[in-house]
Amino acid sequence: MNKLRRIVILTGAGVSAESGIRTFRDSNGLWEDHEVMDVASPEGWQRDQELVLRFYNARRSQLKEVQPNTAHIAIQQLEKKFTVNVITQNVDDLHERAGSENVLHLHGELLKARSTGNAELIYDWTEDLNTGDLCDAGHQLRPHIVWFGEAVPALEEAIDITSQADIVVIIGTSLQVYPAASLFAYAPPEAKIFYIDPAPAENHEALSRKHFETIAQPASAGVPELVEKLVTQYG
């Protein structure tokens, strides 16, 4: 019976922040001291490719210095009792390093690069990415990140996954980044929705759902607490 209980975890920057990864929304529109649109938009790439490459090389290097936190680990523990899908806005690999098996990255992955000439050509990339690094077809490679103004290729798959959920857990997100913020709306009407954030959004449409519960705690505290509750009640 427990395997029929499908849990969908929607995670945002607040989960990674507790591992030491900074997010631009916590620093007045700056991301690691850069204007976000300079390093996370097609226009920024066209304007200064070298700056964008250096920026993501630094993020990739930083990723090697951080570790999954108790929230990542607790999420993975749910897989022992339930069918679990993680849909994350984060571009790091901390969910995977914690052992989660079904992880969908809405906004791309820091440890991948893709061709500027063919978006289907995607490569694993763990070291620096530089001008002159080319795909098999001879095009410059760019970070495999969904920048502002670009489509979210994984969105349809995320909607399909969420539409099958018995339980949705939203963790560490302001519920302001669309389309990710609207994913919960695709969950079945009877699905239980839990929202974990130290400063939860107010007056958001999610709060009007019939089965909705807010846990006003940081992910590292709120997620283990909820996992214990879910295992006790449904596991």
Image: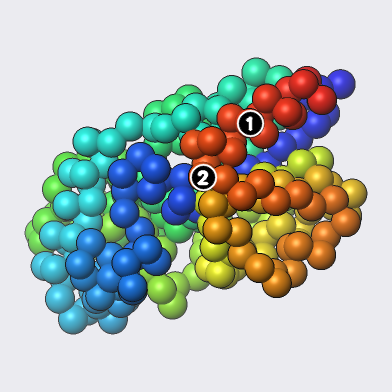
Q: Amino acid at mark 2?
A: Pro
Q: Earlier in the sequence, mark 2 or mark 1?
A: 2
Q: Give the vertical position of 180 relative to 3 (above or below).
A: below
Residue in front for this viewpoint, 129 or 12:
12
Residue in front for this viewpoint, 14 or 188:
14
Q: Position of residue 57 (x, y in %)?
A: 17, 52
> Which residue has dot 2 on it?
218
Q: Position of residue 203 (x, y in %)?
A: 70, 72
> Which residue has dot 1 on it?
225
Quadrant housing the N terminus: top right
Q: Position of residue 24 (x, y in %)?
A: 34, 65
Q: Is residue 44 left or right of residue 181?
A: left
Q: Position of residue 204 (x, y in %)?
A: 69, 69
Where on the picture, by quarter, is residue 221? Answer: top right
Question: At numbered mark 1, what does the secondary structure look like: helix, strand or loop?
Answer: helix
- At 85% from the left and 51% from the top, the residue drawn is 211
Q: CA distance from mark 2 to mark 1?
A: 11 Å
Q: Amino acid at mark 1?
A: Glu
Q: Is residue 34 visible?
A: yes
Q: Give the vertical position of 35 relative to 136 (above or below).
A: below
Q: Is residue 148 left or right of residue 134?
A: right
Q: Is residue 169 left or right of residue 53?
A: right
- At 33% from the left and 74% from the top, the residue drawn is 29
Quadrant housing the C terminus: top right
- At 31% from the left and 54% from the top, the residue drawn is 22
Question: At numbered mark 2, what does the secondary structure look like: helix, strand or loop?
Answer: loop
